């Protein structure tokens, strides 16, 4: 199935049914009085997170959705039927924004979570509602109101514990293929990865985590260059970022300079995302001798003080077990801390919210640029 992680849709809730104008007509009842019933409420449009979906591709073929209208009221105080709700299934991890008001409506982060995106119109009132001591035979009714109509931007953010970032051809896809069952496309040229990839890394029988790989970042990515920035939102739910740095780039560039450039792009995209723990993982270290690797590790440690720096070679299988064990231990420690410390939970909630806001702001700006600001 084609991977599509963004879509624009039009939704319209149902119109409320009109109130009825009616008077009782019964044998032996001289003054029956008004008995016009109210109309039915218009149907709502709701988005529901479905764990069985992993792409927004369906919305490319069906971009418009409409709920049912409420039925008109009837005689004998019969209320019209409510309009049928329109329930739209979306993948877990979908963020929903209203393009008309440039505002995020919600984030569907859990299976079966439901979000009301367009409310049905209110019902019209029948003439029985307007009976009073001074007006025993009212002929007044009200029409049902129109339902809400919105232009929505849907943005999918993958659910993963660990995210891989780095320049094109830094070895991210190769690493993912070596430590998980995922089989991303791998080749010796840049931009092999054109869509995000997910893999489950199993460290032990009862210990595993999900790793996400996105297209490589290049200088100017935060301003639209290359492919990676449009997928950076897929790293926004991760707890830990692994920054893969080619230990010996084919173009002869400096790995330390390359690492600094990638992280500058992440900060330009989202300062909150850059506050996530980031480990530096040197890749392709089999291309360096022992002294060369030691010098590079010292330089990395000096340039990124306080950071964890690890050396790996996916080709030789060096350092991969140590990397996955340390990642699993760090994630387990964080989960334990999160469960036992209310202050940490509050800080994590605040950071996650800030990341969501910054990532959504980028997504909204991009969506409005596509539509020329007309929506």
Image (cartoon, rainbow, N blue to C red):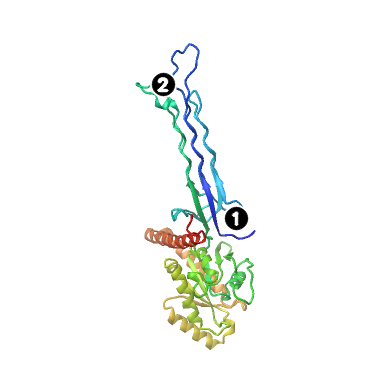
Nearer to us of marks 2 and 1 is: 2
Between 279 and 98, the one lying in front of the other is 98
Secondary structure of the residue carrying tag 2 is loop
From the top left corner, tell me how far across and down residue 151 is, in percent.
Answer: 50, 52
Residue density around tag 2, few if under 14, some if 14–19, many if 20 or more, within 10 Å: some
From the top left corner, tell me how far across and down residue 20 is, in percent.
Answer: 48, 28
> Residue lying furthest bottom in this view?
291
Q: Quadrant of residue 191?
A: bottom right
Q: Looking at the picture, does residue 329 appear above or below residue 97?
A: below
Between 260 and 316, the one lying in front of the other is 260
Residue density around tag 1, few if under 14, some if 14–19, many if 20 or more, within 10 Å: few
Q: Disc 2 or 1, which lies upstream in sequence?
A: 1
Instruction: Let me know if residue 152 appears in the view.
Output: yes
Check if mark 2's residue and mark 1's residue have beta carbons within 8 Å.
no
Mark drawn on residue 78? none
Q: CA distance from mark 2 to mark 1?
A: 53 Å
Between 278 and 42, the one lying in front of the other is 42
Secondary structure of the residue carrying tag 1 is helix
Quadrant where the N terminus sits is bottom right
From the top left corner, tell me how far across and down residue 201 is, in percent.
Answer: 58, 66
Mark drawn on residue 60? 1
Task: Please state if 320 lies on the left or on the right of 143 as rendered.
Answer: right
> Residue lying furthest left in this view?
134
Q: Quadrant of residue 226?
A: bottom right
Q: Looking at the picture, does residue 358 appear above or below residue 149?
A: below
Q: Looking at the picture, does residue 35 appear above or below residue 107?
A: above
Instruction: Let me know if residue 277 appears in the view.
Output: no
Q: What residue sits right under mark 2 in the picture?
A: 137
From the top left corner, tell me how far across and down residue 49 is, in percent.
Answer: 54, 51
């Amino acid at each position: 199935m084609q991977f599509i992680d963004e879509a624009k849709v039009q939704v319209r809730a149902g119109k409320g049914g009109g109130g009825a104008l009616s008077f009782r007509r019964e044998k032996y009842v001289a003054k029956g009085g008004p008995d016009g019933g109210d109309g039915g409420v218009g149907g709502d449009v709701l988005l529901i997170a479905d764990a069985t979906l992993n792409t927004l591709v369906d919305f490319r073929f069906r971009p418009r959705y409409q709920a049912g209208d409420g039925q008109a009221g009837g005689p004998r105080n019969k209320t019209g039927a409510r309009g049928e709700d329109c329930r739209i299934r979306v993948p877990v991890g979908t963020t929903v924004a209203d393009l008309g008001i440039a505002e995020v409506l919600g984030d569907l982060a859990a299976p079966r979570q439901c979000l009301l995106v367009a409310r049905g119109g209110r019902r019209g009132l029948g003439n029985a509602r307007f009976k009073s001591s001074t007006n025993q035979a009212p002929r007044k009714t009200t029409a049902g109101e129109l339902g809400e109509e919105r232009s929505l931007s849907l943005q999918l953010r993958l659910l993963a514990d660990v995210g891989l970032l780095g320049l094109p051809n830094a070895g991210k896809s190769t690493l993912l293929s070596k430590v998980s069952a995922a089989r991303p496309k791998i080749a010796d040229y840049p931009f092999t990865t054109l869509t995000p990839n997910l893999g489950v890394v199993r460290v032990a029988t009862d210990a595993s985590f999900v790793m996400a790989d996105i297209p490589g970042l290049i200088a100017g990515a935060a301003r639209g260059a290359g492919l990676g920035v449009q997928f950076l939102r897929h790293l926004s739910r991760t707890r830990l970022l692994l920054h893969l740095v080619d230990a010996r780039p084919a173009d002869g560039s400096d790995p330390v300079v390359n690492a600094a450039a990638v992280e500058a792009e992440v900060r330009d995209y989202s300062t909150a995302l850059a506050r996530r723990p980031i480990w530096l993982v040197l890749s392709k270290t089999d291309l360096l001798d022992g002294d060369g690797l030691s010098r590079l590790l010292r330089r990395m440690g000096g340039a990124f003080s306080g950071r964890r720096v690890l050396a790996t070679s996916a080709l030789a299988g060096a350092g991969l077990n140590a990397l996955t064990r340390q990642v699993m231990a760090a994630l387990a420690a964080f989960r334990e801390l999160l469960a036992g410390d209310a202050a940490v939970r509050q800080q994590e909630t605040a950071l996650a919210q800030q990341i969501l806001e910054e990532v959504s702001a980028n997504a909204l700006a991009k969506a409005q640029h596509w539509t020329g600001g007309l929506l």
